[in-house]
Structures are given as structure tokens and as C-alpha cells.
Amino acid sequence: MPRSPFKLLLPAVAGAIVLGLWYGVHFYLEEEMRFLLPTPGAVLRAFWDHCEALGRATINTTQGALLGFGLAIVVSFGLAILLSLSAHVRTSLYPYLMALQMTPLPVLAPICVIWVGAGLKSVSLLTFVIAFFPLVVNTTQGLISTDRNLVELFALYRASRVQQLLFLRVPAALPYFFTGLRIAATLAPIGAVVADMNAGSSAGDGGGLGFQAVIYSSQAKYPALFATAATTCILGFVLNAGVLALSWFALHHWHDSYERTDR
């Protein structure tokens, strides 16, 4: 069902309110403190003034985010299949997966730099770490939550475990997988920026948005710092839009969540 014009206007109205509050807070501050919160106009000018540096940094961050994100998808899906085979396997491995997820990136960054060197490899590896956990947990949950009646039906027709996995459990787990994918798509740009701050390298113009943020902060270029943050948000929105489009393409023909919205 197409959205009504009123619903389409709601984000624009909310954005206008936020911009109004932003300007209000800026001019409410004492004049010598206003540099702490640049106006949206100042941020837009910073976009223009630093577009070349921000564009180059965005490309570098996107590479790290996509490489880590893609690696997380492949590894998590394979591991989720392994975890779904046995409760004993899940009990054995889950504590270590949680330990990996709970270890802060700034702690892991020096280890990655020692192992693979500073730059794109470390950024990709650290992005993988932050995107991996929600994917493997959600996919595993989907694989083990298959309708018991359908599992018994496959057993009645003497389907092998491989057939049951490919034609029943994996399709049934797709909604869970895409839920994890959306979470990971949100975390991947954040992980890439934080990783770039701690393990990035500017060699050969290889610095990403995190590296640019450190530079602008040290130089007190606060409008440019806000522009860098906004660029990171845009990157996250684009990655999420891609995941949503892929989810719609894979599920809208048969999954209830899409069928309800089409009526």
C-alpha cells in the first residue's frame, strides 16, 4: 500500500523542527561559545570547502566498511549453520563469540595493527568484528526456529539433512538473517570510522572519515567535524537502504510482513 502524502511529510516536518531547534540553541549560547555548535549553514559550507578531502575519506571508509561487512556475512552464515546443528556446539562456542563482541575496538586495534598492519586491512578486520555478532546470532536463531510441523513433514518424506537445510531451514531463517543484516549495516560504518581512528593510516591518501575527524578536531575545525559526522550518517543510510531493498526483493513475494503492507 503506498504511503499517504501526510506520512511522507512527517519526516520533513520533524527535520524542520530539528533545524529550528538547532538554530535556536546556537543563538541562545553565549557568543564566545557558539563555535561549539556550528549552524547547519556553517556545516554545509564546510561540506563545500572540504568536499575533496571528505570525498576521498568517504571512499576509503566505504571500502573498509564493505570489506568487513561482506566478510561478516560470509563467516557468520557458515558459522550459524554449524551452530544450528547442535545445542552442544552452541553452548560451547557462544561464550567466546560474546567475549569477542564485548572486547572494545580500541583494545583490539593495536592487535590488528601488529597482525596485518595499519590501514585498510585493520579497518576491515575491526569492522568485521563489530558486524559479525548480530548476523550470526540472528541467523542461528532463525535456523533453529523453523516450524516443527514442517520439519516433521520433511522427515516424513525422508528428506536428507542437507535437503532440509537448503529447502526448509535456510528459507525460513531469511527474515531473521535480514534483521541481523540491518543491524550489521548500521554498525559497519560506525565500526569503520572508529577503526580508522585507532588503526587507520593516511599513507597514500588512505585515511578515512575517522582519520579526518581526528584532524579536524585537533585543528578546531568544528563545522568540518560536524560535516564528517553527517557524511558518516549518510553512508549508514545508503548501506541500510541497500539492505532494505535486498530484503524486499527476497521476501516480499511470500513473507507475511510484506504481504500485509501490500493489501
Image (cartoon, helix red, strand yellow):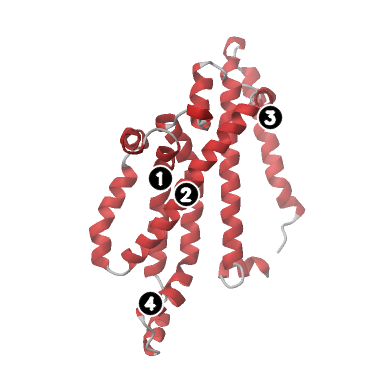
Mark 3: give few (<14), some (14-19) or many (20+) Cα within 10 Å.
Answer: few
Residue at mark 2 to residue at mark 1: CA–CA distance: 9 Å
Specify the amino acid type for callout 4.
Val
* Quarter of the picture holding the C terminus: bottom right
What residue occupies the far bottom of the structure in this picture? 157
Q: Report the label total.
A: 4
Q: Which amino acid is tagged 2? A: Phe
Question: Which-is-in-front pick, marks 3 and 2?
Answer: 2
View extreme (front): residue: 204
- Which residue, given by chain and number where applicable, does mark 1 sit on? 130
**Can you identify the residue that label 4 sits on?**
162
Q: Position of residue 105 (x, y in %)?
A: 36, 37
The residue where tag 2 is placed is 69
Q: Check contact, mark 3 vs mark 2: CB within 8 A.
A: no
**Location of residue 128 in the rendering, given as x and y in whole percent from the top left corner:** 41, 47
Of 168 and 145, nearer the camera is 168
Q: Nearer the viewer, mark 2 or mark 1?
A: 2
Give the position of the N terminus as an image quadrant.
Answer: bottom right
Q: Are marks 4 and 2 in contact (CB under 8 Å)?
A: no
The amino acid on which the numbered mark 3 sits, given as a three-letter code, is Gly
Earlier-in-chain disc, 3 versus 4: 3
Residue 37 in sight here: no
**Outermost residue toward the top in this view:** 32
Report, in whole angstroms, how far the alpha carbon at label 1 lies from the one at label 3: 35 Å
Q: Quadrant of residue 37?
A: top right
Q: Which mark is residue 20?
A: 3
Q: Is residue 38 above or below residue 103?
A: above
